[in-house]
Image (cartoon, rainbow, N blue to C red):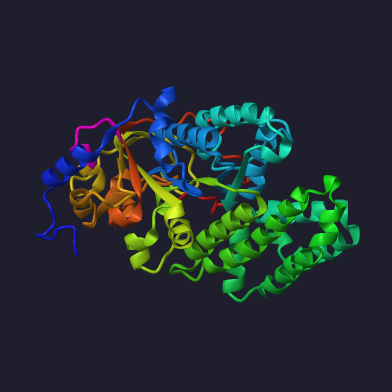
């Protein structure tokens, strides 16, 4: 059905239904903002989205909600759309395993405003303080789910083996030597393989992962304290090398392959975390395009899936998918691939979009919850496909319809939705983009 179907409710009718069902939320910086989200505390996995990668309200709201889920409901994992080695530095800080990351540390190589911003700093400081009073095994962890850290992950596997199995480290260096020349710019590896200039390194990477898995018990036994944390980190890095090798080759084949590889890896990483942690309960921070059920969007209709869809299929009613949206304001974003961050004006949303419908409610901040699916009138409205806006690290207002809108059925994409009529950009810490970040560093979604 098209968004222009004569059977669809008018925008005024849609906005009226949304207004009658929206629950007013306090200011996002108010201590009580997270209280309304107690209703989701029975889930094992709560996925918190964002409509941009650079909006203060989205980060602050996710932090408040996550704090509530940790304090009142026993959630013990925060998993984010960031790379495993980079987020591991934050994990070391919040679990008292390493000093706090500094803005001058060039190895903390996020698309920097995405994770190196004031809202993340405040949350990390809070989590470190809370963890201080807990036994080491009960401290809340924060981990990265993403796939881009080919070079860092190779280094991490070799460093681990040099400390625990020096002979195996020699073999790992030999196997990874195929990829080492491409560590700084892995996208060039994918191009070289696709063009037939280079044979793929897949077999050597697979053998290295297999060898690490076969040595699991011996390596865990050699780990200081015998808890296997160091081995788990090395294993995850070996899995990233395997996934990244596939990903950078898939980039040049086109179609949905690279997107699906990335989100499959995110889901597999989540599953590894859930299996590794006793009584695991996880909060995920990622873009709406990853968190929402792709099967209910134009992405899914074109053959793409995402972590939200895979989590929903696996966990059923034990998971909650929460989308976030805004109409206008400012955002931290880049105007083009690889360009420096700017604070940019976000255009008011299109009238025929979901954001336009929420704007029509006149509500400044609200929570819409249809998890129980018992609200017939609301579900009828939400079951109509409409345009939805997605701003990644790049924002192109001059081509907004083509660059940032896609069709979605909100009723099946999410279980709930957090609305901010007006929003502002995050406040970055340090330089926007460290020197040497590859072109494919996630300046999209």
* Residue 70 sits inside the magenta stretch: no
Residue drawn where x is 67% and y is 71% of the image: 202
Occupied quadrant, residue 112:
top right
- Viewer can see residue 425: no
Residue drawn where x is 23% and y is 32% of the image: 363
- Viewer can see residue 243: yes
Residue 415 horizontal/vertical position (percent): 35, 50
Residue drawn where x is 54% and y is 32% of the image: 71
Occupied quadrant, residue 440:
bottom right
Figure check: 105 above or below 236: above
Figure check: 303 above or below 404: below
Residue 59 horizontal/vertical position (percent): 46, 35
Left or right, residue 56 beside residue 380: right
User: Which of the two residues, 405 or 443, is positioned nearer the viewer here?
Assistant: 405
Residue sitting farthest toward the left: 6
Residue 11 horizontal/vertical position (percent): 14, 46
* Residue 364 sits inside the magenta stretch: yes
Figure check: 355 above or below 431: below
Magenta stretch?
358-366
Left or right, residue 353 beside residue 222: left
Count up the numbered dots: 0
Residue sitting farthest toward the top: 30
Q: Quadrant of the N terminus?
A: bottom left
Residue drawn where x is 82% and y is 66% of the image: 174
Residue 64 horizontal/vertical position (percent): 46, 31
User: Which of the two residues, 154 or 104, is positioned nearer the viewer here?
Assistant: 154
């Amino acid at each position: 059905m098209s968004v222009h179907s004569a059977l669809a409710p008018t925008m005024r009718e849609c906005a009226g239904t949304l207004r009658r069902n929206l629950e007013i939320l306090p200011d996002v910086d108010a201590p009580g903002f997270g209280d309304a989200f107690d209703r989701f505390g029975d889930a094992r996995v709560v996925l918190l989205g964002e409509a941009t990668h650079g909006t203060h309200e989205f980060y602050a709201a996710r932090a408040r909600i996550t704090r509530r889920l940790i304090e009142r409901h026993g959630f013990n994992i925060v998993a984010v759309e960031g790379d495993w080695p980079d987020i591991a530095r934050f994990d070391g800080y919040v679990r008292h395993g390493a000093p706090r990351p500094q803005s001058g540390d060039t190895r903390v190589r996020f698309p920097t405003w995405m994770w190196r911003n004031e809202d993340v700093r405040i949350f990390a400081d809070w989590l470190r303080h809370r963890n201080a009073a807990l036994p080491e095994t009960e401290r809340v962890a924060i981990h990265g789910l993403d796939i881009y850290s080919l070079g860092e992950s190779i280094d991490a596997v070799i460093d681990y083996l040099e400390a625990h199995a020096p002979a195996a480290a020699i073999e790992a260096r030999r196997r990874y030597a195929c990829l080492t020349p491409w560590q700084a710019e892995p996208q060039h590896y994918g191009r070289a393989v696709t063009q037939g200039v280079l044979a793929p390194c897949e077999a050597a990477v697979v053998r290295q992962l297999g060898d690490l898995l076969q040595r699991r018990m011996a390596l865990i036994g050699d780990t200081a304290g015998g808890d296997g944390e160091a081995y788990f980190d090395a294993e995850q890095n070996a899995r990233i090398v395997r996934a990244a090798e596939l990903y950078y080759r898939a980039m040049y084949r086109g179609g949905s392959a690279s997107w699906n590889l990335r989100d499959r890896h995110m889901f597999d990483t989540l599953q590894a975390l859930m299996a590794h942690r006793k009584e695991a309960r996880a909060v995920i921070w990622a873009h709406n395009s990853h968190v929402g059920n792709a099967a209910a969007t134009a992405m899914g209709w074109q053959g793409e899936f995402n972590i939200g869809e895979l989590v929903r299929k696996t966990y059923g009613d034990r998971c909650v998918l929460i989308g976030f949206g805004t109409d206008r304001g400012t955002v931290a974003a880049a105007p083009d691939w690889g360009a420096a961050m700017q604070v940019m004006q976000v255009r008011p949303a299109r009238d025929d979009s979901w954001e336009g419908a929420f704007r029509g409610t006149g509500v400044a901040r609200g929570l819409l919850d249809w998890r129980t699916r018992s609200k017939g009138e609301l579900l009828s409205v939400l079951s109509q496909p409409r345009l939805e806006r997605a701003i990644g690290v790049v924002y192109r207002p001059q081509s907004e319809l083509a660059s940032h809108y896609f069709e979605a059925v909100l009723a099946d994409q999410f279980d709930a939705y957090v609305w901010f009529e007006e929003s502002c950009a995050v406040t970055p810490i340090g330089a926007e983009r460290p020197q040497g970040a590859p072109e494919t560093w996630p300046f999209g979604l």
